[in-house]
Image: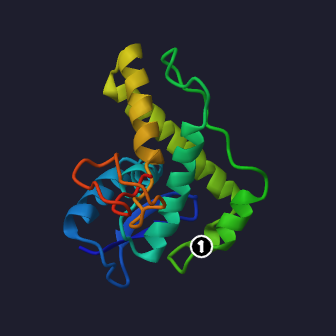
Amino acid sequence: MDLAPILTPHGSLILGPAVEALAIDSKREARLEQAFARGSGHGLLHLGIDEVGHTLPPVLSYWRELGARYVTSLCALPDIGEDGTKPAVPMPADGEFDKFAAAVPPMTGAEYLTAAVMAGLWRGIDSAFDIELAQAKLSVQDRSRFWRRIRHGFRRRPRRSICRSARPCRNIPARRTAGACCRC
């Protein structure tokens, strides 16, 4: 079944039947459906963590951007995970949600999108993350490792295809020639 995001008049983002077929594979569609079945926050969190770097239709890419902004703000919190708690992730600066809402692609319910709805969705992502963290039942030490893994994984950048250095590469043992590395 082809699904697409729909914004309800009450500000909830759900997946519903698509008017036009979205070009996503069935496994990814099933994962999205499962995440959104738990709520808007869980679906947006899934998009912002698990679908970064994947090709998605424009309407899903738009919502992935909100999830990714949340994860970026989460990773920027100082000393997170050290005492086993996570403070609320601060919302973007004033006017950011207005700009984001103005750029919504054509979708069902786009007329309901306002800065207040965006703020509610942000709080929903934060609540979803707290729930998923609590359900993971991690100790304080494991939580610290969990945070480091999220920060490391999310900050990883795609490799460049051309090395900036003219010297032989020492970063990748199989590539000892100059210009074959992406990390120099």
Which of 153 and 88 lies nearest the eye of the viewer?
153
**Residue 166: % across, % down:** 44, 60
Q: Quadrant of the N terminus?
A: bottom left
Which of 18 and 93 lies nearest the eye of the viewer?
93
On screen, residue 30 above or below 83: below
Marks counted in the figure total: 1
Q: Residue furthest front?
A: 167
| Amino acid type shown at disc 1 | Val
Residue at 55% across, 38% down: 74
On screen, residue 132 above or below 27: above
**Residue 8: % across, % down:** 52, 64
Residue 18: image quadrant is: bottom left
Judging by the rendered image, the residue that carries numbered circle 1 is: 104
Residue at 50% across, 63% down: 63
Residue at 52% across, 20% down: 85
Residue at 48% across, 46% down: 155
Left or right of 36, for residue 105: right
Which of 98 and 178 lies nearest the eye of the viewer?
178
Helix, strand or loop under label 1: loop
Q: Residue furthest right?
A: 94
On screen, residue 142 above or below 124: above
Left or right of 60, for residue 171: left
On screen, residue 132 above or below 9: above
**Residue 165: % across, % down:** 47, 58
Crowding at dot 1, Cα within 10 Å, few <14 / some 14-19 / many 20+, comes out as: some
**Residue 38: % across, % down:** 36, 47
